[in-house]
Image: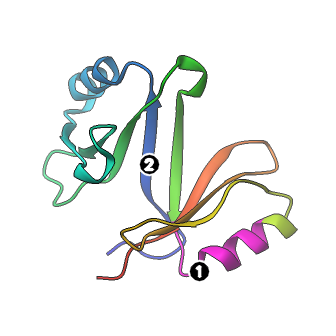
Amino acid sequence: MTAPNTVAWFQIGSDQPEQVKSFYAGLFGWSYTADPAFDGNYDLISYPGSPAPAGGIARMHDSSANHAVFYVLVTDVAATVATAETLGATVQVPVTKAPSGLIFAELRDTSNNHFGVFTPAPA
């Protein structure tokens, strides 16, 4: 299990997901499986030799939405967002609970870098 307050997930958004998948497969040997929870709009990324996916590729409608975002595992998303705001962050996606039970939010830091925080779904 990844320790709290560490980068534990990343997402790449692309309007050309097959092209970006091919690029990273060729560069790093990444493999992909469709995430059934997202109706073909999200692929899970696995590293060679890794026991579980560590990221995802989201399909975007156009290139203006392309992105790369890292997500930090935290013990309390709402408290982390509140602290981040007091430190100067702005909220991009408010605290959200996915149907699976995963809780996440997305922010911009004081240099306008996009990042996310999450707490996994209960086991």
Question: Residue at position x 51%, y 56% from top?
Answer: 71
Question: Residue at position x 59%, y 80% from top?
Answer: 76
Question: Residue at position x 38%, y 18% from top?
Answer: 16
The residue under label 2 is 10
Asked whether residue 78 is drawn in magenta, I would say yes
Q: Amino acid at mark 2?
A: Phe
What colouring method underlies this structural image? rainbow
Q: Secondary structure at mark 2?
A: strand
* Quadrant position of residue 81: bottom right
The residue under label 1 is 76
The reply to whether the C-beta atoms of the residues labelled 1 and 2 are less than 8 Å apart is no
Q: Position of residue 13 (x, y in %)?
A: 46, 33
Q: Amino acid at mark 1?
A: Asp
Magenta-colored segment: predominant secondary structure = helix
On the picture, is 69 further left or further right than 37? right
Q: Nearer the viewer, residue 13 or 62?
A: 62
Give the mark, 1 or 2, whose residue is nearer the N terminus: 2
